[in-house]
Image (cartoon, rainbow, N blue to C red):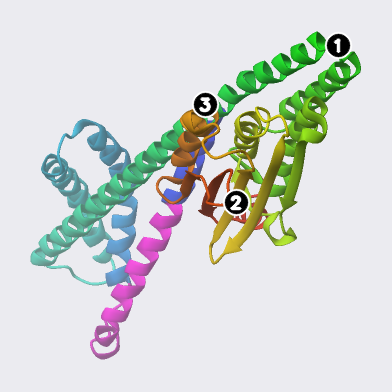
Amino acid sequence: MLFMNRQNVLNLRSFWQIQIIGWCCFYLFNLLESIHSFLTKRESIDVETVPIVLMFLGSFPLRPVCRWLLRQSRSWIDFELKAAAAAMLTSIPAGCAACLILRFSHPVPWHAVVATVMWSFFILFMWCSLYFSIKQWQQSSEEKERLLRAESEVREARLLALRYQLNPHFLFNSLNAVSTLVLDGNAPAATRMLAQIGDLLRTSLDSEVTAEVTLSQELAFTEGYLAIEQTRLGERLRIDMAVPLETRDALVPSMLLQPLVENAVRYGVAPLVEGGRIGIKSALHADRLRIVIGNSGRRGEGEQRKNGIGLGNTAERLKTLYGTDFEFSLGWPETGGCEVVLELPLRWARSLQEASPCAL
């Protein structure tokens, strides 16, 4: 209710600003157009002033009439016909009143009365048409804004739903790893891993849920996950990270790296007795951010898992967030192992903050 009242006040203020400025400009235009008559024929300025003032006053009752017509009329022609009738009913008393006032200073013939009424009718009818056009434009703009807002809310809801799909998946895998450590009799490692899982989940729950975060934030979360895996796998898991500073402020989808790294560990490192290596690299290419996540597992390991939850979820979120403006591929290089390559539109956290208003 408070928002609606505030919006009505803003609309009313906007109307009066346009109303006053428009009539003042129209009045000045008529004065400039008639300046030759004022200088040569010695006509009084009130010949232009009085009719325009009365037309300005006549537009006051026309506003509620036009608002009512906008709600009742089903077509532009219907509105214009009814607006013409309202303008005629308003222009007759306005034109006649103007002529009566002007008679106090100089005689006014009857044909001047008719001309003044018709001129008032034309101006007031154009005022109604202009009012109708502005209101239609406002309604169209508001409708487009509502549609864009609704689309944005639907997209954000979809992104959040896809992100929340990852949490139980990650939790299940982590607790299964803890269970394995307990069964193996490695209680200290299981206890440490439970504490790490708790810290990671607390970080996930305490942080603000957003569609995008900086690459440095995403790396911090992923490193927390890798610490859990290193507790489980020990020296079998080796990590290579090559993430230059110039890429760390770039925006990436929230929870982008963790499910991809989890897939790399689960299918490319954990099944191997000798373990393996996980690599995370990033680089800038023109207006793109390139991220490569690879493992040193044997070719074909996890190949049947390329449509798993982690990869499928990531592909859906990228499509929802960027449309078709991204690249996401899974491949097996000749040198061995498997790698996921991402190329995203380059967006910066600092520029996004500068573009956003401070208060909403």
Depth order, front residue of 226/89: 226
Q: Secondary structure at mark 2?
A: strand
Separation of residues labelled 2 and 3 (CA atoms): 20 Å
Q: Reply yes or no: does residue 20 show up in magenta.
A: yes
Q: Amino acid at mark 2?
A: Ile
Q: Amino acid at mark 1?
A: Gly
- Residue occupying image coordinates x 14% and y 39%: 75
Separation of residues labelled 1 and 2 (CA atoms): 38 Å
- In the rendered image, the residue lying farthest to the bottom is 40
Q: Which numbered disc covers residue 309?
A: 3
Quarter of the image containing the C terminus? top right
Q: Amino acid at mark 3?
A: Ile
Residue holding disc 2: 291
Residue holding disc 1: 185
Q: Which mark is in front, 1 or 3?
A: 1
Q: Secondary structure at mark 3?
A: helix
Residue 316 drawn above or below residue 19: above
Please give left or right for residue 117 compared with residue 176 in the image.
Answer: left
* Residue 120 occupies quadrant: bottom left
Depth order, front residue of 128/104: 128
- Residue occupying image coordinates x 50% and y 40%: 9
- The magenta region covers 16-45
Q: Secondary structure at mark 1?
A: loop
Residue 163 placement (x, y as % from top left):
57, 29
Contact (CB < 8 A) between labels 1 and 3?
Answer: no
- Residue occupying image coordinates x 68% and y 47%: 279
Q: Which numbered disc covers residue 1?
A: none
Please give left or right for residue 192 compared with residue 221 in the image.
Answer: right
Residue 229 placement (x, y as % from top left):
76, 29
